[in-house]
Image (cartoon, rainbow, N blue to C red):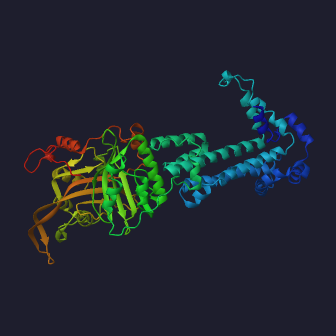
Amino acid sequence: MASLACMRGCAIAPRIATTLVSRRKAQRRPAHPARVAATAQRPPDREPADTRTLGLLAATAALALAPSHPAHADVLPEIVASFNLATFTPQVFWFAMILAPRNPVVKTVMGSWFPILVATGIHFYVDYVGFTQPGALEEAAKFGAVFDPTIAPWDWANGAVTGPLVGFQSMLENPNFVTEEWAHVLAWDLFVGRWMWLDAVERDVPFLWACLLTTNFTGPPGLLQYFAVCLLSGKGLPPAGAASSSSSSSTGGASSLALPPMVPAAIAEPDAGALIMRLWDSCATTGRLCWSARDIAAACAEDVEWEDLSHSSTPITGRADVFAHLSARQARDEACGSRLVVERACDGRTGAGFTWHRSNDAGDVGLRGTTFVEVDGDGRIVFVREIAEPLFKPGGGTAALLRAVAKPPAVPPVPLGDARRQPTNASDLVAYLWLEVQGAADFRAEAARYFDKNIVYQDLNFDLPFVGVDHVSSFLEEFDIPGLTFVPDRISDGEDSCCFTWEVDLGVEGAARVKGISFYECESFFGTIEVRDEDGNVSRVKGDEVRVTYVRDIPESTLKPPPLQALAGLVKPDIRTFKPLLKEQQAVAESCSVNAMACRTSTGDLRVDDKVPRK
């Protein structure tokens, strides 16, 4: 206690007050101008050389910013300037971490010790000024009342023992002490905020900006808020080891693991579908996790863009940051025994995709999702979008909301007419339906022509899939909203199945667009098809007709990460749902039992489990 009192008290100038004792002290001291001169021109024998060197930078800045007319005649101008420096200088670093946490310049500056040295340098200068003032040791004696060793431990929480509070309150009447404490608090706040920034950038912790704002404003509650965000987002508490974030300071927040080298460019034509099977659907050869952050990062181009729309609306760019993101995810999955099960994967040269669900050693079906992958001419991944289903299922409420918001077009839709054609494969069918037929007055009727009678349509905003062409047609009618347009932006080039990304345009200028992913699986059926010649004449001939047998739609969640997903990650981190979900054939059977008329086949028989979708 005595050592602490000495270290604190020696840095504190005497309290200037209107008491009798203070007035007597003031009579023994020179007038204010003389004090300024003495501070600036102190004889060498009273100021050690090493102290002058350490305080030179802070002293120069403080004197430069010192006001010519202090607000109080007894406050040193250096103290006033130091208070201002301690207040405003750290805000530059706070705003950098809040507004641009992954900016290369911010990573370089905040990844070094420079911001902390600036804040502690200001505090050191305040202490230096206090050391040089007469009567500092007398002021230090007041710490005896604050850290009173005579107070027994069982009285620490006794509200009747007021000595420590009164002692500290009396010290706050001294502007030098206030400045020292203020610089002390802000330096430690910045230290904690920088630590949070390093951890959040390394482990992709969301809502960093909110936690930094709270920490900057009120200190420790911001750290508690950050811990809560880590838990609710499924990231887990930060590592307690001393080296957990220190490694990030030299790498700009990237993973401490060495970035794997890129795989050689593909010699033959790129094959996105084969790449997906190699990287994600390899349980038999790589163990239960079924994917490796190192292998995926090695297959990425340097300028890869990765959209994890269940994590953040901001894409992760660059191979190093993608590797850090995937490495953190892999570590979490390995720790809780989770694995990713590929359900369906589509073929494609430049683009492909797959549907999946999380599982565990018990084989439970957990959180479901879809991933779209696009490769360049060298066969390296240049774009990925992945979305997991929302656990809150709004169902038909989504259509009601969209209908209320969408702006109907000024011109009513017209029939498709001569624009009809016969798609040749899965990707051509997707392009035909959503780029050519959508918006026509007879869109639903034309789309229904290409739905298999036993189609399974999973819109993951609903609890159960839609089964059968009649049930799916009713669903499409509900979402056939004037003014609402699904805008595909990336379509894979698969023959048997197609994965594509899209946005929802509500026809309202400036309105945000919701992003999503769809997966279509198709089959070719030999039968009678319509063929249109160059003159527009239609003839019916025998040939293969493409029909959709399975669909999965997933829109992104507005809140990221979705709160229920984060909470489920705490309850069941392996499957990330509160309880195991129904397997697909079970969900189909339940949907048929609920919607019996919609699930009747063309023969009138009730379809329950006769259709098990292919994998």
User: In the displayed structure, does residue 150 sit left or right of residue 190?
Assistant: right
Residue at 25 percent across and 57 percent down: it is 520
Whether residue 488 is visible here, answered yes or no, is no
User: In the displayed structure, does residue 540 sit left or right of residue 423?
Assistant: left
Which residue in the rendered view is the most extreme toward the left? Answer: 603
Q: Nearer the viewer, residue 185 or 266?
A: 266
Whether residue 38 is visible here, answered yes or no, is yes
Q: Position of residue 476 (x, y in %)?
A: 23, 54
User: In the displayed structure, does residue 28 sit left or right of residue 501?
Assistant: right
Say which quadrant the N terminus sits in. top right
Q: Position of residue 535 (x, y in %)?
A: 14, 78
Residue at 31 percent across and 56 percent down: it is 277
Residue 500, quarter of the rendered image: bottom left
From the viewer's perspective, is residue 23 above or below residue 114?
above
User: In the displayed structure, does residue 556 sit left or right of residue 549?
Assistant: right
Q: Position of residue 107 (x, y in %)?
A: 57, 57
Which residue in the rendered view is the most extreme toward the bottom? Answer: 535
Q: Position of residue 16 (x, y in %)?
A: 82, 40
